[in-house]
């Protein structure tokens, strides 16, 4: 054991300079520190200090950046109307709704609107007041383990029973049946259809997606068609192709020449959503603060959400999904054929057995497996 220097305190601490100045700094127990090593050690402390300041500065900058993104979202996004107590007249009693998701699963109802794409601002339907209806309706399931994002498109002409005594209608009719609380009646309709709790509802108009395409300098879309088609002067061949905002808008609006009509347009919409998400979530875009800020500002300005999906909740959800966007599964609700309703509306009949199977997979957290096996 090395003997302590006579000038050192018995229990540690500083006891003044030792008799031998060469022993003043120690490089390990009882060893005099070489002056050159002393200088290097001080320089090392300086370097570490600078690195710590850089890290702290980066964290502060990130905080300021995230705050700026939060303000960009909160300052642009709109919210659906609700009554003063947070409940709506068209929302069923809690005991009549599916059980709440208490395992971390998040289900979102996404409504898309396009005044030039089909339903328009006023599509006349029997027993339905004049008013805008959605051309795009998607049930988005984000499993508790955030292993992916599962998207089920619902054709706007699917024939469903609307809760609250409204009777049977096309699935996009509730938006007009209970205006201005149509989104909440639509939520109740989707909860009944999928037998699953909807946590959030959001609506986005087509300009929101095409605006993102513009911010991203275009996206690469995989056209699922087996033959070319034309819309607004653009020709879209099967397979992957780069599209600018105008081309993307034309791509998702066309349906007249498809044998499957709106069902084929639904696939096109899914292809554009996948392309936008893949491009927006790419490392080169996420590493570009200006582009991210522009994307959030553009998208949120065309977005309407429920009151609970404020900036904090949206940021928390987005952060938890940071890896899930790379594993997106798409599907379209099966139907039992098409025909006409008793009041003369052209409709898709509901495949109740298929809906029961989908509901089971949602409940068991295996919707992603169902969609993957169906591709």
Image (tube, rainbow, N blue to C red):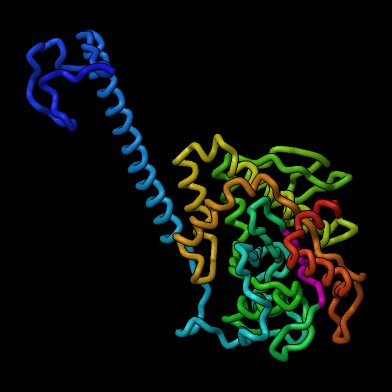
Looking at the image, which residue is at 29% across and 23% down?
47
* Residue 265 visible in the snapshot: no
> At 10% from the left edge and 12% from the top edge, which residue is drawn?
21
Residue 94 visible in the picture: yes
- Residue at image position (14%, 10%) is 22
Q: Position of residue 256 (x, y in %)?
A: 83, 59
Q: Which one is nearer the viewer's eye here, 187 or 124? A: 187
**Residue 217 vs residue 272: left or right?**
left
Q: Quadrant of the N terminus?
A: top left
Give the camera-side residue of 122 and 51: 51
Say which quarter of the image contains residue 191.
bottom right
Residue 56: x percent and y percent? 32, 38
Give residue 235's quadrant in the image.
top right
Looking at the image, residue 16 lies above or below residue 369: above
Residue reaching furthest to the bottom: 165
164 to 203, vertically: above or below: below
**Residue 360 shown in magenta:** no
* Relative horizontal placement of residue 38, taking residue 62 as reference (left or right): left
Comparing 240 with 279, the one in front is 279
Horizontal relation, residue 71 to residue 5: left or right: right
Find the magenta span and give its range. Answer: 151-159
Residue 101 in the image: above or below residue 148: below
Q: How many marks?
A: 0
Q: Residue 111: where, in percent of width, then height?
A: 65, 66
Q: Where's residue 66, x and y in %?
A: 41, 49
> Residue at left 73%, top 79%?
124
């Amino acid at each position: 054991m090395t003997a302590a220097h006579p000038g050192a305190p018995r229990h540690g601490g500083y006891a003044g300079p030792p008799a031998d100045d060469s022993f003043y700094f120690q490089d390990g127990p009882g060893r005099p520190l070489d002056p050159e090593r002393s200088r290097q050690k001080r320089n090392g402390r300086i370097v570490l200090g600078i690195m710590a300041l850089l890290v702290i500065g980066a964290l502060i900058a990130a905080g300021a950046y995230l705050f700026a993104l939060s303000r960009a979202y909160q300052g642009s996004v709109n919210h659906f109307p609700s009554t003063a107590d947070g409940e709506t007249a068209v929302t069923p009693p809690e005991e009549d709704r599916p059980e709440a998701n208490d395992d971390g699963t998040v289900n979102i109802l996404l409504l898309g609107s396009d005044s030039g794409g089909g339903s328009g601002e006023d599509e006349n339907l029997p027993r339905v007041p004049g008013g805008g209806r959605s051309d795009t309706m998607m049930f988005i399931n984000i499993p508790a383990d955030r292993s992916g994002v599962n998207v089920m498109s619902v054709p706007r002409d699917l024939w469903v029973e609307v809760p609250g005594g409204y009777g049977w209608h096309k699935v996009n009719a509730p938006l007009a049946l209970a205006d201005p609380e149509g989104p909440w009646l639509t939520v109740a309709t989707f909860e009944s259809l999928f037998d699953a709790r909807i946590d959030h509802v959001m609506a986005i108009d087509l300009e929101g997606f095409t605006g993102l395409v513009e911010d991203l300098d275009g996206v690469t879309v995989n056209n699922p068609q087996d033959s070319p088609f034309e819309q607004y002067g653009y020709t879209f061949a099967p397979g992957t192709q780069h599209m600018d905002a105008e081309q993307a808008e034309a791509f998702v609006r066309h349906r007249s020449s498809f044998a499957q009509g709106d069902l084929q347009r639904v696939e096109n919409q899914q292809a554009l959503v996948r392309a936008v998400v893949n491009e927006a979530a790419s490392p080169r875009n996420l590493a570009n603060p200006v582009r991210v800020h522009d994307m959030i500002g553009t998208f949120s300005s065309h977005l309407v959400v429920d009151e609970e999906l404020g900036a904090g909740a949206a940021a928390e959800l987005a952060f938890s999904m940071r890896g899930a966007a790379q594993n997106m599964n798409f599907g379209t609700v099966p139907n039992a054929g098409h025909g006409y309703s008793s009041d003369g509306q052209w409709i898709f009949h509901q495949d109740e057995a298929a809906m029961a199977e989908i509901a089971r997979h949602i409940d068991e957290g295996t919707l992603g497996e169902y969609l993957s096996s169906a591709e």
